Amino acid sequence: VRRAGISLVFLAWLYAVPFLLIVGLIRRTWHGPMATHAQAVAFGATTDRLLLWGLLLNLGLPLLGMGLALGFDRYLVPVFAGSAAGMLLVFAAYAVVASQARTPMIGYVPADEEPRPVVTQCIPRSGGRGCPGG
Amino acid sequence: MGHTKGRAPPRLVTMTAPQWIDPPLPQAPPVPPEQLEAGVRRRADYGLSFLVALGFYASVVGAFVVGAVSLPVAPQSEDCAGFCFSPALTMVVFLVFAVPYAIGLLLLTLVILVPVVRLTRSPLLAGAVSGGAGLAITGMVVLSIVGSR
């Protein structure tokens, strides 16, 4: 039972990390304009979260599993050594993709079609700067 | 006074197996479970390893589908002939065309697993290695076919 539990850490790493990173990369490579700026910001923030969680789990799960294996089940130590090697491969692949990308991987907001507000007249505000000629 | 001297009871002769013919086998010391497992199972379970690799493929394909579906649908312009390809619809078309590659990937995995299960006793490790190798090889084949066109 204990071995099955620690094995779940390996399976979580093997299945969740590629899933999160691939979904995040597909969303990041999509640049098409969103309808509104708020939607674009929300879309970019969700994509950031997917990528960050993918990277975080890629780092954390093999280390957690290695710690559990060393503490409770030495049989699983080579398994998590393999996941540590896979972790380095994933980071290397991510670095290659990031170097090829034209946009920053984290913190990119796709374009939107919302018209920018154009300042046409000066409105005096209390505490603000004074308007010229007024 | 006849002291009736009872007859001595018959000696009970028990026939035991002659020890010198069939000496007891030396008892092996109890083996700790880890060593027992190491001695019994020297290779990873083939079916379990294949299931692990299958789950890996499912999560990768699922990631592509979820990623494509999560993209916002582009506003439908009027100049589409009949209908427009949304990212999700494009992904469905890709999946249909990917069926032969998927079958090839599964067969390739079955072949790769044959040597890999001899390298390790863990189906987790064998499944992950063969899944990654199968996906990498299939990806290179697909890319070379796409690139050659």
Image (cartoon, rainbow, N blue to C red):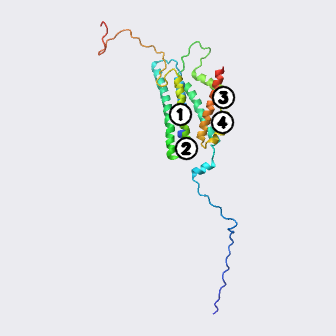
**Front position among marks 3 and 1:** 1
Whether residues under marks 1 and 2 lie with C-beta atoms below 8 angstroms apart, the answer is no
**Does the residue at mark 4 contact the one at mark 2 (Cβ under 8 Å)?**
no
**Between marks 1 and 2, how big is the CA–CA gap?**
19 Å
Picture layout, residue B117 above or below residue A91:
below
Measure the alpha-carbon separation of dots 2 and 3: 33 Å
The residue that mark 3 highlights is B101
Q: Which residue in the protein does label 2 denote?
A: A76
Q: Residue at x 60, y 33 (%)?
A: B132
Residue contact between numbered discs 4 and 1, judged by CB atoms under 8 Å? no
Q: Which residue is mark 1?
A: A88
Residue B108: % across, % down: 67, 33
* Residue type for callout 3: Tyr
Whether the residues at callouts 2 and 3 have beta carbons within 8 Å, the answer is no
Secondary element type, mark 1: helix
Mark 4 nearby-residue class (10 Å; few <14, some 14–19, many ≥20): some
Say what secondary structure mark 2 lies in.
helix
Horizontal and vertical percent position of residue A57 = 50, 34
**Residue sticking out furthest to the bottom:** B1
Say what amino acid the circle numbered 4 marks. Answer: Ile
